[in-house]
Amino acid sequence: MAAEEKKTEEAPAEAEAPKKKSPILLVVVLVIIGLVLAGGISFFVTTKMMANTNATNVSEHHDPGTFVKLGDEKEGILVNVGGPKAGKFLKCGIVLEMNPAKKDNVEEGKLKPMAETKILDSTMQILRSASLDEFDANKQDDLKKKIKDELNDKLGQGSVYDVYFTSFLLQ
């Protein structure tokens, strides 16, 4: 009987020992799984971010464009903005860098009448429909991109290289 009592006493002692090791083992396994997940997520995010920055950092190599000022040579464009109740006016000078290879739009450094009409109409519509918040100095790059994209849609992709504001007065 004494031998049986020793076996029963050793059995609980042996059963307790794995229970103490299993929480430590469980913590180690969870830490390893966490590290693998963190590494996988960071790899995924890094590859996605690098793919996006590589696509945007590719500079467009193009021939020097033809620079064309919109509106009056001295005054530029004068348009009411912010809706009829806002009572605000925008006086701005806008210069477009046009693709000289697009003969439908530019000839001998000047806009053709049809292209000029489309450009002025689209530009005025964008400026009139923009909210007053969009004319903030920090958001002017978005406004330039919006004008460029709209003009390229109207005139054909690659027609406008860039948009420049030479003066900007909101009153």
Image: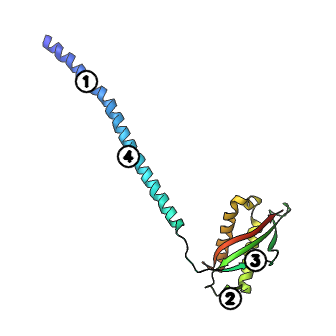
Other-residue count near label 4 (Cα within 10 Å), few / some / many at <14 / 14–19 / ≥20: few
Q: Closer to the camera, 78 or 81?
A: 78
Question: Which disc number belongs to residue 15?
Answer: 1
Residue ID at (68%, 88%):
107
Q: Which is more foreground, mark 1 or mark 3?
A: 3
Residue contact at pointers 1 and 3, CB within 8 angstroms: no
Type of amino acid at the residue the image marks with label 3: Leu
Mark 2 or mark 1: whose residue is earlier in sequence: 1
Measured from the top left, where is residue 93 in percent x and y?
77, 72
CA distance for labels 4 and 1: 32 Å
Type of amino acid at the residue the image marks with label 2: Glu
Mark 3 or mark 2: whose residue is earlier in sequence: 3
Mark 2 or mark 4: whose residue is earlier in sequence: 4
Mark 4 or mark 3: whose residue is earlier in sequence: 4
Q: Is residue 107 left or right of residue 28?
A: right
Q: Is residue 145 left or right of residue 14?
A: right
Measured from the top left, where is residue 169 in percent x and y?
80, 65
Q: Secondary structure at mark 2?
A: strand
Q: How many marks?
A: 4
Residue 170, quarter of the rendered image: bottom right
Measured from the top left, where is residue 84 in percent x and y?
84, 64
Other-residue count near label 2 (Cα within 10 Å), few / some / many at <14 / 14–19 / ≥20: few
Q: Which is more foreground, mark 4 or mark 3?
A: 3
Residue ID at (45%, 58%):
47
CA distance for labels 1 and 3: 87 Å
Residue at the disc numbered 3: 70
Q: Closer to the camera, 167 or 31?
A: 167
Residue ID at (39%, 43%):
35
